[in-house]
Structures are given as C-alpha cells and as structure tokens.
Image: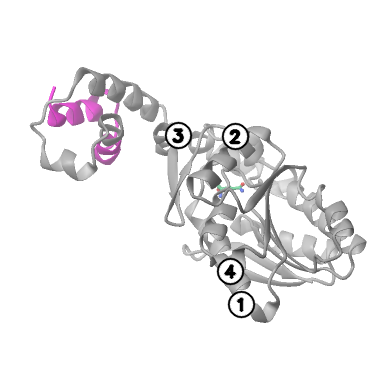
Amino acid sequence: MTIQETLRKACSKYKLSPLDAEIILSLAGNMPKVYILAHPEKKLSPAQIKKYHSFAKRRSASEPIAYIAGKKEFFGLDFVVNKNVLIPRPETELLVEHAIERILNTKCGMPDVIIDVGTGSGNIIVSIAKNIPNKIKNKINFYAVDISKKSLEVAKKNAKKNKTDKNIKFIQSDLLEYFPLLAEKNKKIKNILIIANLPYVSSKIYHVNKNNLKFEPKNALISENNGLNHYKDFFKQLRYLSYKCYMLHVICFVEFSPEQKSEISRIITRYLPKAKSEFFKDLAGKWRMAELSF
Ligand code: GLN
C-alpha cells in the first residue's frame, strides 16, 4: 500500500482528520511529515502498515498523540511521557519563564533551593535546570517531588535525557512534607523557590472534558473542592514551613484554572496572610498563574 492510500484509509476507516492521519503515519513509519507529503506514491513496508493500524486505532479511540508517540515537546525540549504522567501543557511554559527570570534576577537573592512540587514528567524542573547558566546552576539544590513513584521514574528519565540528572534530586513526598525538616537542619538555606502545578481540575470540568482527559492519570488532574483541595493542603504546608524556619524567604509560583482566580486568592490570604501575591494570564489571555513571596 502507498502513503496516499494509507492516508485515505486512515480518514475513512478510522475517522481521523487529515492532520492526525499524517502525524500517525509519520510516527508509525518513522518518517518526517514533509517526506510523507512529498512522496504520496511511496510503498510502505508490512511492518510500517501494521504499526500504522495499531496507532490509528488508538488515535481513533481519542488517545492523545503524545502517549502514542511516547513523547511531548515542552519549552523546546523533548520529554518522555507515558500513562503515569500528565502530558505537559503549553500554558505551563509561563511558570518556567517566570521562574527562570526570578532565578537570574539577582536583586531578589539567588535561591539556594528550587523545589518542583508534583513534578510529573519533570518537565518544569528539567526545563529550568537546562536554561540557567552552569555557574549559577551549580550553586543551587534542585528537588523534584512527587507522591507517585512511577512518575518519579519518568522524571528521572527525562532529567537524564536532557542532561540535568546530576543537578536534580528526586524525592517521593506528599507535597512539601519532606521539606520542613530539611530546612530546619540546614540553616544555610535562606531563599527557596517553589513551583507547583498541582492537580486542579474540578470533577465538573473533568466530566465535561472527559473524552480528552480520560487517558491521563486522574490523580494528577482532579482535586476535590472545586479543584482546590491540593492547593489548600499545599498552602497549609507552606505556612508550616515558614513557621518552622521563620528566616526563610520564599518565592512560589502556582498554576491554576482560570475560574479559580478569586477563590485561590482567598485561600492564599487565609493561609499565608503575609504573602505578597501577583496574578498572571497565559497566552490565551486567561488567568493561569500566581506568584507569591514572603
Ligand atoms: N491544565 C491541565 C488541564 O486543563 C490541568 C493540569 C493540572 O491539573 N495541573 O487539563
């Protein structure tokens, strides 16, 4: 069968859009998309056709391309993904950009420690580590934290793949649980930068978008109480951390869902009354991130 025939079949038999059909074929045949477009008459091997059928079937059941490909691009880097981790979202690049800016802005005092809470595939911490100069990077302790062992495995792979594994420690912890003791023991820690992209999807929004989200780990997406339960626990832990180590200066970036802005702002004031907070919109013009400092 030729490339053109295969593409036609993908659209009719599997009801794929032409764009999806091309992407799937490019993955199954291990050929760049431009090659597919330039050589419609080229014959495919039986192995390529077999793989293509299996990929096309998965795609027609709405499985995200990233899981079929086993990878996703984020912040210009390649990340391995599988069903144990959330697929990195483009809007999360906002957190990475702001975090890098803070780290390089020496007026704020360089962080001694950077913690990525709920690291998942490790996309945030790896992108940060990859994009700051070695001279600065080597003075900072990076921590990638997740409650899921399986996601930490993926994060480690991604750190290795992007040559940042020597810089990052991987810790299994329920949010910040691991850190008050560490900060208490190590009095040299003065500035901490925390980035948190916790599960924040409400059950209501999850059900509306179930078809797109059903392949991703539910416990990395959904949070009780309109999506804000994890953030409540997190801010409580943050309050405890700053109570235990009252000399600490903390900068913290959190990602949330646009409709949560006023509620999350209320929770921040309730748990961290001394924190200064600023809110930012993503590229789609929706509220997406808060920066706290105290
Ligand atoms: N942004 C993701 C979504 O809307 C959710 C990410 C998260 O819960 N941290 O699907």
Question: Which residue is drawn at the image coordinates 88% and 57% (left, top)?
Answer: 185
1 or 3: mark nearer the eye: 1
Question: Which residue is drawn at the image coordinates 56% and 60% (left, top)?
Answer: 128
Q: Distance between the residues labelled 4 and 3?
A: 36 Å
The residue wearing badge 1 is: 105
User: CB atoms at circles 2 and 1 under 8 Å apart?
Assistant: no
User: CB atoms at circles 3 and 2 under 8 Å apart?
Assistant: no
Q: Distance between the residues labelled 2 and 1?
A: 36 Å
The residue wearing badge 2 is: 217
Q: Residue furthest bottom?
A: 107
The magenta stretch spans which residues?
1-23
Report the side of 197 relative to 80 (left or right).
Answer: right
The residue wearing badge 4 is: 135
User: CB atoms at circles 4 and 2 under 8 Å apart?
Assistant: no
* Quadrant of the snapshot with the C terminus: bottom right
- Up the image or down, 185 lies above or below 84; here it is below
